[in-house]
Image: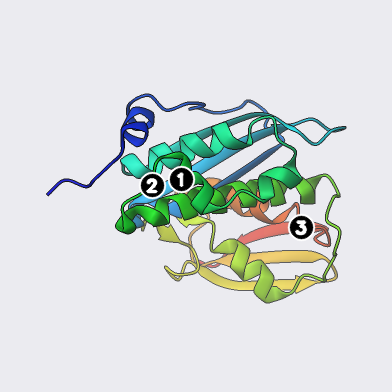
Amino acid sequence: MSLPYGKKLLELFKHPHNVGKIKNPDAKATEGSPACGDMVTLYLKVDDKTHKIEDIKFESYGCASNIATASVITDIVKGKTIDEAKKVTWKKAADELGGLPPVKVHCSVLAVDTLRSAIRNYEESHGLIKNKVPTTRNDIIERLKHVMNPMKGLDIVKTGLLFDVIFEDGKVTVILELEESNQFASNLSNEIIEQLQTIWDVKSVEVKFNL
């Protein structure tokens, strides 16, 4: 039996808005996993003075609801300040689409989570974090759960690719259970650095390989 998708959702699935990449974005975030069925990447261009989102684009992997919710989120927040965008909820996104089947509500949650991660990335990289709580090793590991293991389709923590994390005096050392000659080693290293380097009290990030 087909899912009860509304007219607007189907229209945005067939003709999504703001699809693609932004060259040299001010912020970027990816959430989800192909192995779980849905993944979204958002790119932001933000005005430094007004903190308004001047441009936003997305790439997605997944079902009609995933594509449509990512599309509608970009429409909702474009032109808003980052503080206004942070207040957008998954219910707002779902309502804009005329509702979602209960089994697809997670798609709107994923879109909003990706937006908030991108905004956090922007705030961290531009020194806008107001409540600067010292980062812990566990915080670093939580961030690494957003880095995908391309050989498994799930994150590097869940798949056991992460061997160890050392965080001392602002220096992060991430050790992977992987050969340095592996075809994915360079990309993984870059993604890990990208994920961690914006944290306000992280001074440097080094990735090492344990095999």
Q: How crowded is the residue under tag 1: few (<14 C-alpha within 10 Å), some, or many (20+)? A: few
Which comes sooner in the sequence, label 1 or label 3?
1
Give the vertical position of 52 relative to 106 (above or below): above
Question: Total label count?
Answer: 3
Q: How crowded is the residue under tag 3: few (<14 C-alpha within 10 Å), some, or many (20+)? A: many
Q: Considering depth in this image, is 90 or 153 the residue closer to the camera?
A: 90
* Label ID, residue 95: 1
Pinpoint residue 96: horizontal percent, then vertical percent.
47, 40
The residue positioned farthest toward the left in the image shown: 1
Q: CA distance from mark 1 to mark 3?
A: 34 Å
Pinpoint residue 39: horizontal percent, then vertical percent.
43, 48
Q: CA distance from mark 2 to mark 3?
A: 36 Å
Residue at 54 percent of width and 67 percent of height: 210
Residue at 74 percent of width and 74 percent of height: 136
Label 2 amino acid?
Gly
Give the vertical position of 124 relative to 165 (above or below): above
The residue that label 3 is drawn on is: 199
Residue at 70 percent of width and 35 percent of height: 80
- How was the colour assigned to the protein in this rendering? rainbow
The residue that label 2 is drawn on is: 99
Q: Considering depth in this image, is 78 or 130 the residue closer to the camera?
A: 78
